[in-house]
Image (spheres, grey):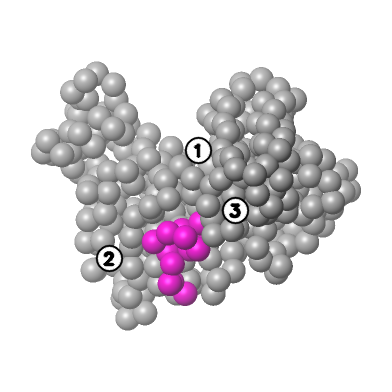
Amino acid sequence: MEHTSEPVALAVDIGGTKLAAALVGPGGTVVARRAAPTPAGNAEDVWAALAAVLVDLLDLAAAAGREVTGAGIASAAPMDLRTGVVSPVNIPGWRDFPVTARVGALVPGRPVRLGGDALCMALAEYHHGTGRGSGCLLGMVVSTGVGGGFVLDGRPLFGVTGNAGHVGHFVIDPAGPPCGCGAHGCAEAVASGPSMVRWALERGWRPPGGTADGVALAASARAGDPVALAAFRRCGEAVARVVTVAAALCEVDRVVIGGGVAQAWDLLGPAVVEPLADYPGLAFMRRVEVRPAVLGVDSGLIGAAALLVDERLPVEPLPVGEPAPAVI
C-alpha cells in the first residue's frame, strides 16, 4: 500500500466461516484486505483471530500514513445496536459478545458502527453497485440463509435493535416446511441453498458428481434436469413473494439480490422476475426492478465502511454491562 495521507475506514465483515477486514477509502475503494478462518472455539478464540487481522491492517495504515477515521462492522444477526453486542447464529462461541467495544478499543476516540451483514450489502450496492439511483432499495442475500436490508430514501433501516430487514422470515406459506427459526413456511425454508438442495433430493434428484450442493443443482438445471429446474422455479417464486411484500410495505423501487444462489443468476433471475408479472395487484408494486448484485465478496466490507458516512445513524452503544431499554 502506497504511502499517503488519504484517510481510510476500518471495515469488518464477520461470518461463520471467514473473518474479513479491509481498509476502505473514499468512494468505497478497498485499499487493503485481510481474512482468517472463523475458529470453532470459544468467544476469546474467535476474538483473537479477528483482532490479529485488525491489528495487521491498523499497522499497515500507520506505516502508510493513512488516518483511520473509524470502524464499521457487518455481522450476522441477531444483534443489539443499543449495547453493541452480537450473537451470530453461525458463530456458536459468540453470544452477547461486545464486538463494538472490543473493536473500539483498537481505534480509541473514533466512531464504531455496527450493522447487519445483509444491510451492509444493501448499503454497498446502493452507493456503489446496481442499487445506485434507486429511491428505496431492498438488498437480499440468498445463500445458506436468506437475509435482507432496506435503504429507504438514502437511509439504512436498522429497527429498534438493528435486526430490521429479516425478509427471509416473511412467512410465505403457513403450511410450508419448518424453518430453523421455529416457524413454518418462511422464505428461508424454501429459498435458501440448503433448502433447495434438500427439496430436490427428496424428489429424486441425484447430483452428477456425487456432491449435493447448490453448484451441482445449478449444473443439473442448466443441463435440463426437471427437478433441478423446478427447485429454482420454487426458489424464485418464494423470493418474488418477498419482493411483493416489500414493495407493498415500503414501496421499494429496486431489489438487488446477491449471495451464493444468486451466482446462478441465469437461473434465479428469470425465476424471480416472471412471477412478478402476476403477484402484485397495485401499480406501484409492479414498478419494482430486480437486479443482481455486482460487488461480490467485498460488498459486506464496502457496506460496513458506508456505515460511517451518515451522521444520522444510531448513537454510540450503551456501555457494556448497562441494561438496554426493554422492548415491549
In the rendered image, residue 123, in percent from the top left (x then y), is placed at 53, 59
User: Which residue in the structure is indicated by mark 3?
Assistant: 25
Q: Which is nearer the eye, 119 or 304?
A: 304
Q: Earlier in the sequence, mark 1 or mark 3?
A: 3
Whichever of labels 2 and 1 marks the residue nearer the N terminus, that label is: 1
Residue 307, which numbered label? none
Q: How many marks?
A: 3
Whether residue 73 sits left or right of residue 227 in the image: it is right
Work out which residue is located at the far left of the displayed protein and give it: 224
Give the Cα distance between marks 2 and 3.
38 Å
Residue nearest the observer in this picture, 229 or 174: 229
Inter-mark Cα distance, 2 to 1: 27 Å
- Look at 54% across and 74% down and name the residue there: 153
Q: Which residue matches tag 2?
A: 276
Q: In the image, what residue occupies the spot 47% across and 74% down?
A: 135
Report the residue marked by disc 1.
180
- x and y percent of residue 173 in the render? 38, 53
